[in-house]
Every structure is written in structure tokens, then in C-alpha cells.
Image (cartoon, rainbow, N blue to C red):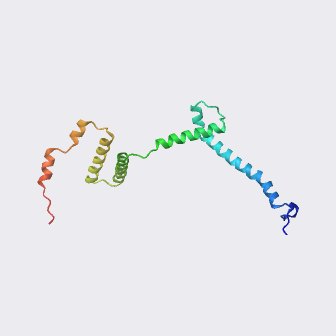
Amino acid sequence: MAPSSPSMVPADGNGHSAQGMRKLRKPVIEKMRRDRINSSIEKLRMLLEKEFHKQHLPSKPEKADILEMTVTLLQQHLAGKTAPSSSQSYTEGYSKCLQVSEGFLSQHRQTEAQVKLLQNIHWTQAVAEGTLSSKLIMNQAPSKDTADETSKVIWRPW
């Protein structure tokens, strides 16, 4: 028959039973958990200190205030980070490509073709940013004379 009295439960080397060890460790583990929570809340308070000053909240806000402010700011941040539209993504990608191309062309000795490419990149960026006036854009557009000259050239594969 198995021992049924607590005095008969096997003890560890120090004379403590397994159940007694759990009872002794539980408060220690709970204190460690509370310390981790409090430490994280304190870090949040330090991160949000400027926001508390903007909101005119006390310098030592309660834990609930800190958590509420964090949730509010995260919701605002996520709402502002909605997925960009396809045209917005295209524009951002196009601008990035122009910047990389300009950086690459600027690093090397510039030939006439590279200078023309750089001028075209700068013109395209100005058009995209809307900094060129419509009058300047009309002056930069290819004229009928240049269109006639290019149409006179016939490409032959042989």
C-alpha cells in the first residue's frame, strides 16, 4: 500500500517534500513575474515621457495610464501605416530607382551619355515633384524639328 500521510512523502536532500518545495517556490516565481511586468511598464513610461508632457499628465503616471497611452499610440501608429496604394508604391519605387541611378552615374567619370542621363533624371524628378512650371516643361519637351530628324533615320538590321 502507498504511503498516504504527508510525513511519508519522500523528501529531498534537505528534508523538504516536493509539495513543500512548490509552496516555497511559488511566491518567489510570482515576485519575479511581477518584477518583469513592472520593469516593462517602467520602460514604457520612459519611452512615453514626452507624450505624457504633451498630454499634461502627471510626471509619475499610474501603470494603467501608461498602458492606455501605449495602446492609443500603437493604434494611431498602425492606422497611419496602412498599406500604400499601388500608385503610391509605384511612385516611391520609381523615385528610389531614380535616386540609385543618379548616385551610380555620379560616382563614375561622366561621358556625354551619362551627362544626358543625369539631366534627364533631374528633369524627371522635378516633374514628379511638381517643381517645374508648365512653361518650363513645354520648353523641355522634344520639338517637332527633333522629331523629324529622328524619323529620317531608318534602322536596318543588316
Query: Left or right of 118: which side holds 72?
Result: right
Query: Left or right of 131: which side holds 18?
Result: right
Give the residue at the far left of this rendering: 152
Q: Quadrant of residue 62?
A: top right
- In the image, residue 142 sits, relative to residue 14, either above or below, namely above
Q: Nearer the viewer, residue 4 or 34?
A: 4
Q: Residue at x 48, y 42 (%)?
A: 79
Q: Which residue is drawn at 49% across and 43% down?
A: 78
Residue 133, position as x, y percentages in the image: 27, 36
- In the image, residue 10 sits, relative to residue 138, either above or below, namely below
Q: Which of 45 and 142 is in front in this view?
A: 45
Q: Quadrant of residue 17?
A: bottom right
- In the image, residue 155 sits, relative to residue 40, either above or below, namely below
Q: In which quarter of the image is residue 155?
A: bottom left
Q: Residue at x 38, y 48 (%)?
A: 89
Tell me the quadrant of the picture where the C terminus can be found: bottom left
Query: Left or right of 8: which side holds 73?
Result: left
Residue 41, position as x, y percentages in the image: 65, 43
